[in-house]
Image (spheres, helix red, strand yellow):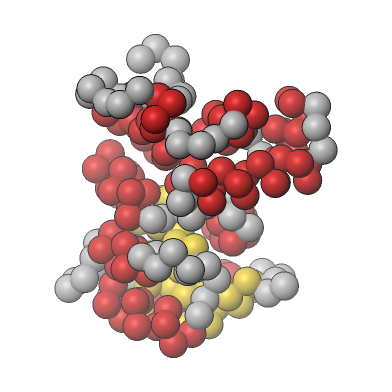
Amino acid sequence: MTIRVLIADDQMMVRQGFTVLLDAEPGIVVVGQAVDGLDAVVKVAELAPDVVLMDIRMPGLGGIEATRRVTASPDTTVKVLVLTTLDLDEYVYEALRAGASGFLLKDASAAELAHAVRVVAAGEALLAPNITKRLIAEYARLAEAPRAPLKDRLGDLTQRETEVLSLIAHGLSNAEIAARLVVAEQTVKTHVSRILVKLSLRDRTQAAVHAYETGLVRPAGY
């Protein structure tokens, strides 16, 4: 299936450059370009892309608020890949909280960009390694605040679903989780689907976020 991409960036050269790069990739087609966040929200409704490449800093409506609006509906299937030159902690955290499924810096290669689009379109999480370290540190800081017991924060998850959620937060793919738990990959997919439904989460990225925020996963050294 062809992955339909919308590029939202206020710089024409950036939009055109990414369009050329992605249109050259098999199975990926750029269906439109947006000049700012508001334009992105409108074009998502018009063009129904699978993935939006969303810049953070744009005039008018910025990328974080645009991401929040694009992913607001629980029925939406569009994934947002935040693409920016900025790697500041606050942007990483806010973008993911707004509903982004991935975060990639603009200095990524063409191959990394195409890979990121495919990963996000498939419902996987995508974070640049240097960003992941900051993100984990931020969640660890938040975890120090008083909260309800862990069991209450994880809802009705079974023991096995809780284990799968923990492995998702550690960055394991379905195949890797299946190997770790010695079960079929389809079984893992079923567990992941149930986790998302029970916790009212959009995708694996949000599941990983939830695992850190609830304190289910604690980074080493924190």
At which x and y percent is residue 73?
40, 68
Residue 107, given in percent of the width and then of the height, sits at 44, 52
- Residue 182 visible somewhere in the drawing: yes
- The answer to which image quadrant residue 142 occupies is top left
- Across the whole image, how many numbered discs are drawn on residues? 0
Residue 33 appears in the figure:
no
Residue shown at the point (62%, 49%) measured from the top left: 193
Quarter of the image with the C terminus is: top left
Q: Residue at x 22, y 24 (%)?
A: 145
Q: Is residue 114 left or right of residue 41?
A: right
Q: Is residue 42 left or right of residue 191?
A: left
Please name the residue shown 47% across and 75% down the image.
Answer: 6
Residue 42, given in percent of the width and then of the height, sits at 34, 83
Quadrant in which residue 55 is drawn: bottom left
Task: Work out whether residue 75 or residue 21 is closer to the camera in this orientation and state it.
Answer: 75
Horizontal side of residue 166 vs 183, given as left or right? left
Q: Which of 55/167 is in front? A: 167
Judged from this view, the residue extending furthest toward the bottom is 46
Name, please, the residue furthest toward the top: 221
Q: Is residue 32 above or below residue 75?
A: below
Instruction: Determine the residue positioned at 39% across, 32% down.
Output: 153
When the figure is inspected, residue 167 is found, relative to residue 54, above or below; the finding is above
Q: Is residue 20 above or below residue 84?
A: below
The quarter of the image holding the N terminus is: bottom right
The percent position of residue 185, horizontal first and vertical second, equals: 78, 41
As rendered, which of 64 and 197 lies closer to the eye? 197
